[in-house]
Image: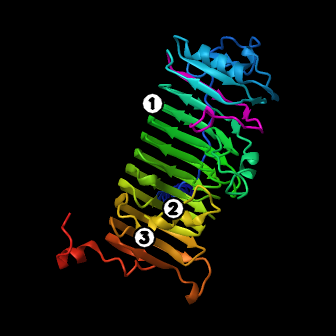
Amino acid sequence: MASRTLLATACCLVVLLLLTLGGALVEAHSAPWVPHRKAAPRRSLSTTANAPESGSPDGYATENATTFDVRSFGAAGDGKTDDTAAFKNAWAQACSSAQPAAVLVPAGKSYLLKETSLSGPCKSRVTFRLEGTLVAPEDKSGWGKPGSLPRWIIFRGVDGLTVTGEGAMDGRGASSWKNSCRTNHAMPCTVAPSALTFASCDRLAVDGITLLNAPQIHLWVERCRDATLSGLTIASPGDSPENDGIHVARSDGVRILGARIGAGDDCLSVATGTANLYATWIECGPGHGISVGSLGRGNSRAEVSNVTVDGAHLSGTLFGARIKTWQGGSGYARGIRFLNMAMDRVRNPIVIDQSYCTTTDPSKPSACDHQQSQSSAVEVSDVVFGNITGTTVTRDAIRLHCSEAVPCRDVVLRDVHLRARKRGEKNAATSSCENALLGEATNVSPVPCSSAPLKKDLVTLGSEDDV
């Protein structure tokens, strides 16, 4: 009898355990975003060549690579001595190695670097193992060649590069922010250095590193193919000017798999020439949200296609999911997906703005006035905003303000629920539109703008081709 009672009790416990696990799995599956988790450090797999001390705990390599420790090339690691030459020499040795190689930046030290260019092509795959901290000098005057954009650290033309580790890069951008014309209108408008740039680097992997206080853009991906950015932490004050987190331009096949970003401008900006970008597990705030654009500036042609943001949490940002284009431009932005996003106290959660304009000199806002009369624009089409929920601190939760010359087409709003943070009828969230052709509006609150007719309605009237 006792054995039957014990068996019955055990069965009940098993059933309860299965029900609990099943509920947890269902809850996890339905979550609109996944919190960022920093990637675990990789294991040491081989001994190190050129280590400063035999058997040193810092002397290890990744994936059976020969390791070149920057200390072996004279890096002081005191945060004051210029270690630029040591890093360049270590890179030159690793890049010329016939076997897979790694440049090791040991933990527990700070390395002062000035403008640093680490170029390929390399003879074999190279890993840049960042465990310590890189710091930029306070004074960055004279950086960059005339007519070019200044860069702090740039990897150029390296195929199969991996940058990984639990270290950090501190751009020490406070002096640049203070001297920006957007902060101080008495100062001349100049371009501050981006912190970390990858140019023409195919099969790129960047994992686990931290970027702090960039003078302008933190991480810039330019003309790269097949790049994966994962487990990144990016942090700057919310009032740091023109201070994007991740900026992608003229690249194909970029994947962003987990990033916690706080910045003074866009957390993620997708610029012209970008195709097949996928981003997930993005935490954004402070900042200006996640943006495609700006596109078409100076009557230029822009091309962006197949961009998906699937899973993001935005907190206290100026914008949420945004597409911004200049009037007078040409080209297209199409196949854009903003999915499974949670908005918390976002000022403008959903925005398409085809009259975007920002002046080089913010003390002269009238320079944007002519934009309203342009007869061309970048065509925005095939855009989906799906499963977007949360709160806005202004009433204008959805703004689809498109060009009269080139209206937005096939814009889909599906399962969107946004409400004003302040309760009350006078604070109720609204939705406004200009020249936006909706392809679908299903289960949307606030109710989609009445000034934007659905595509099917126009086809019925015979005023629009069925395209």
Upstream in sequence: badge 3 or badge 2: 2
Q: In front of the other: label 1 or label 2?
A: 2
- Marks 3 and 2 sit apart, C-alpha to C-alpha, by 16 Å
Which residues are drawn in magenta? 124-153
Residue bearing mark 1: 202
Residue bearing mark 3: 400
Q: In front of the other: label 1 or label 3?
A: 3
Q: Quadrant of the N terminus?
A: bottom right
Identify the secondary structure beneath mark 3. strand
**Callout 3 environment at 10 Å: few (<14), some (14 to 19), or many (20+)?**
many
Residue bearing mark 2: 357
Query: Going 59% across and 22% down the picture, which residue do you hit?
Result: 62
Discs 1, 3 touching: Cβ within 8 Å: no
Regarding residue 207, the answer to whether it shows in the image is no
Q: Amino acid at mark 3?
A: Leu
Q: Amino acid at mark 2?
A: Cys
Upstream in sequence: badge 1 or badge 3: 1
